[in-house]
Amino acid sequence: MQSRRSFIKVSAVSAAMAMAGLVSFGVQAADTIKVGVLHSLSGTMAISETVLKDTALMAIDEINAKGGVLGKKPEPVVVDPASDWPLFAEKARQLISQDKVAVTFGCWTSVSRKSVLPVFEELNSLLFYPVQYEGEELSKNVFYTGAAPNQQAIPAVEYLLSKDGGSAKRFVLLGTDYVYPRTTNKILRAFLKSKGVSDADILEEYTPFGHSDYQSIIAKIKKFASEGKKTSVVSTINGDSNVPFYKELGNQGLKATDVPVVAFSVGEEELRGVDTKPLVGHLAAWNYFMSIKNPTNTAFVKQWSAYAKAKNIPGHKDKPLTNDPMEATYIGIHMWAQAVEKAKSTDTDKVIAAMAGQTFKAPGGFVSTMDAKNHHLHKPVFIGEIRADGQFDVVWKTKGPVKAQPWSPYIPENKGKKDEPEKK
């Protein structure tokens, strides 16, 4: 670490060189490590992603307050791909090639991750992806800190089939029209078939990003549910479409006691703008809820609340909320910092090797472990019921963390696929 006097001197020289045009854009100062933050701050996904940007900045501030990484301060470079999938790839290339970031934390939708993946693989850079997804992918250059289907979707549907979950016999698979919902529902359809549910008892519907009129779809669900068998809805709706969906659910009086909805992309943040009183009892499956009680989570919520107030973050300064992808973002950044310290380098291949087996005490109440081979976290699974205040009561959980299965065993073509990234 440089002394304060040396730091001021170097900063002054650097500033003078920059003014003279002698420092090229994107060159990293000797005492910093640039890290990318790649989240939609505008467009249909901003409702979910903006808070992940702020979570990343909070985690980076926390790491810097404790001395940084390798004696250097991670310096965030924030870009806005604006819910535009090709723009994600363009911004990723900018972060890696121009801004010279050592790692990037970002993406929400699978289509944004699919867009940037070739860039990270071509340039051999690292992406930490913090959201539940459909699996069916295993890249050397990605660490998946969200859930694979066996850590969210499959346990949720098993719960709906169980007596405790209502013994559902018919299922509505309702999602936004892109890769994550369609692939997840392909897996769920195969799983339901293995449990004896016929195609006639599965209704599959998709709406575009930003869709806002759910009147006819809710009416269709009510009709499907009125045909004599207990029905549940599995929702993979993403982004700001969740607000009109849940409002219409309330408008048409579709109660959880009649047709429970379990959501995979709705948490505390998405329910912020919704009257949740008519939605009490509907479900969400995640690996973390804000309402979970343990000392680590209490500290995490308190930390976020103080940060949101100090930074005047819209919405959160008055009503701070935490959610699953925030926890996954927080875990990922701290694990990356730990791996860099272990590797004594930010070199991509050295950090990848050092990430294997990394652990972190997660707010969810368990020690999260990065699998030694498959770049996914071992995570607990929770199913929560919506409360009138927009929080969740946990009604079911696994006994401990579950190892991810990147390749779903319910997809026949996955037979024989290895549980580790291919070396290219």
Image (cartoon, helix red, strand yellow):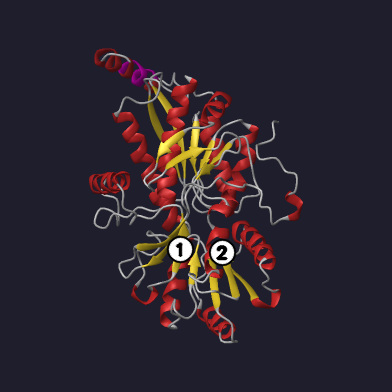
Looking at the image, is mark 1 or mark 2 nearer the viewer? 2
**Residue 42 showing in the rendered view:** no
Residue 158 bears which disc, if any?
Answer: 2
* Residue 227 at x, y percent in the picture: 60, 87
- Assign the magenta stretch its main secondary structure: helix
Looking at the image, which residue is at 41% across and 52% down?
288
The residue beneath circle 1 is 284
> What secondary structure is found at the residue carrying circle 1?
strand
Looking at the image, which residue is at 44% across and 50% down?
325
Pick the quarter of the image with the N terminus.
top left
Looking at the image, which residue is at 71% across and 55% down?
411
Query: In the figure, residue 422 lies in which quadrant?
Result: top right
Q: Nearer the viewer, residue 31 or 205?
A: 205
Pick the quarter of the image with the C terminus.
top right
Looking at the image, which residue is at 37% across and 63% down?
392
Tell me, yes or no, whether the highlighted magenta stretch contains residue 16: yes
> What secondary structure is found at the residue carrying circle 2?
helix
Tell me, yes or no, whether the highlighted magenta stretch contains residue 263: no
Q: Nearer the viewer, residue 278 or 99?
A: 278
| Distance in Å between CA atoms under marks 1 and 2 | 13 Å
User: What amino acid is found at the position of numbered circle 1 in the picture?
Assistant: Ala
Q: Nearer the viewer, residue 404 or 205?
A: 404
